[in-house]
Image (cartoon, rainbow, N blue to C red):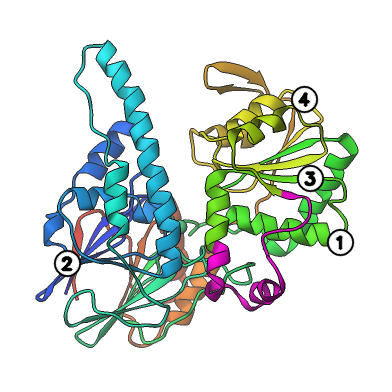
Amino acid sequence: MDISFIGATRTVTGSLHLFEHENGKFIVECGMYQGHREEAERINQTFPFKPKDINAVVLSHAHIDHSGNLPNLMKRGFNGPIYCTSATRDIASLLLLDSAKIQENDYAYLNKKRKEKGLPEKEPLYRVEDAERTLKQFRPVAYKESFAPIPGVEVTLYDAGHILGSSIVLIEVDGKRILFSGDLGRKNMPIIRDPVVLKDIDHLIIESTYGGRTHKDFKGMTAEFRTLIERGKKKESKIIIPAFAVERTQLLVTMLKDLYEEGTLKNVPVYVDSPLAASVTDVFRKHPECFDRETYNIFSEGDPFDFPGLIYVRTSEESKRLNAGKGPMIIMSASGMCEGGRVTHHLIHSIENDDNMIVMTGFQARGTLGRALLEHAKIIRIFHDEYRVRAKVFFMGGLSAHADGDDLIEYIHNVRSERLQQVYLVHGDIEEATALRDSLTHDNDLSVTIPQSMTTVSI
Ligand SMILES: [Zn+2]
Ligand SMILES: [Zn+2]
């Protein structure tokens, strides 16, 4: 079998891997490359294979950098099954439709501008109808239940501990065992189970997003959250929390539920103001089979994602009403990097008041508004206006859904046996992947490579 590393090589986005066997071809992941528009357009539009020649897709989890180019694959001729867990299918369905709508809107705006300049119109990467057709191709499989994407190849999904439904992918062919980590989570995080360690692996393809970094321990995060909320109560703050709609929002809600139960949230209403996050939370409620024991126990007695004083805001009228509301109150909203969505309106209405607080809870990519806030910019630009940042900005650094450098080293160490021939580091910027490789080759004589895009290996 040949494996080609195509996307998420020496970068964190646009994951794509091609597996070619005498019995057929399948791909693992079909992610969208996210970056500057023209570069992203070029990378996303061209596949280095004919989509109609691909027999099947295996998807590790729903995040757009893993699933986001599937509707384009369909549009260009793919017509096979897409295997993933049912939780992944349900979250991916929401994210792909959302992504298609965003693209239609973006291109409508872009084309208006192009028309004014006399330039020809451009077609979005895909439309809502392409996303809808894609949803019909999903074939949900349970964890630990093997299936054959092509004859002679057996694939099994196991918990990755990253987001709801996420999986590591075991591929067995011709007596060889290949493990693809997808995005690997951390141990002892709330809601979902820990990543599974598999043995007797011959080839390990593993992510390296934070290969050179160490996260703050999650254990201290609830105490940090409590301190921030106590401060907010004294100052009657609006506490704005930009949060990713998948997993981060639900994680924060479970932490806030604990804080509610101990009395910290007395007279502090909590608003989750993101229709997407509310819909994703409904998917969580539909999939208790993905929960860890603690969350499952809470679920069997009630709702882990609800408590008195928590309001999921759906309509834009309700959202606008929050602008005039008085603190203390907590508003959690998307997008997580403040690049769009309702959170931008909450920032506009609260950022110039020094009693208010902005609590960042996740990774902020270079060039985003969230990154500027994190780096304590004094003036920021939202849409076409400038705002003075007077609200206090905080960062809760221990909430990441990715393994850090130490976790990755431990995972590789646990998977390692006499059989392990090669470790491939993917899904990480070159600095992070190199740091991880260096700390691995330092300690033992593992063979570790950081494949470049379009590298093919035969195994
Ligand atoms: Zn992910
Ligand atoms: Zn990813």
Check the image and name the residue furthest to the right: 234
| Quarter residue 62 falls in | bottom left
Distance between the Cα atoms at labels 2 and 3? 50 Å
- From which residue to which does the magenta span run? 284-310
Q: Considering only order in the chain, which callout, 4 or 1, is on the residue closer to the N terminus?
A: 1
The label number, if any, that marks residue 55 in the structure image: 2
- Residue 331 in percent (x, y) is at 70, 41
Q: Considering only order in the chain, which callout, 3 or 2, is on the residue closer to the N terminus?
A: 2
Q: Is residue 388 above or below residue 425?
A: above
Distance between the Cα atoms at labels 1 and 3? 15 Å
Q: Considering only order in the chain, which callout, 3 or 4, is on the residue closer to the N terminus?
A: 3
Question: Looking at this view, is 458 or 358 the one in front?
Answer: 358
Q: Amino acid at mark 3?
A: Pro
Q: Nearer the viewer, mark 1 or mark 4?
A: 1
Q: Which residue is mark 4?
A: 353
The label number, if any, that marks residue 269 in the structure image: 3
Q: Residue at x 28, y 55 (%)?
A: 134
Residue contact at pointers 4 and 3, CB within 8 angstroms = no
| Quarter residue 301 falls in | bottom right
Name the element at disc 1: loop
- Residue 427 in percent (x, y) is at 38, 57
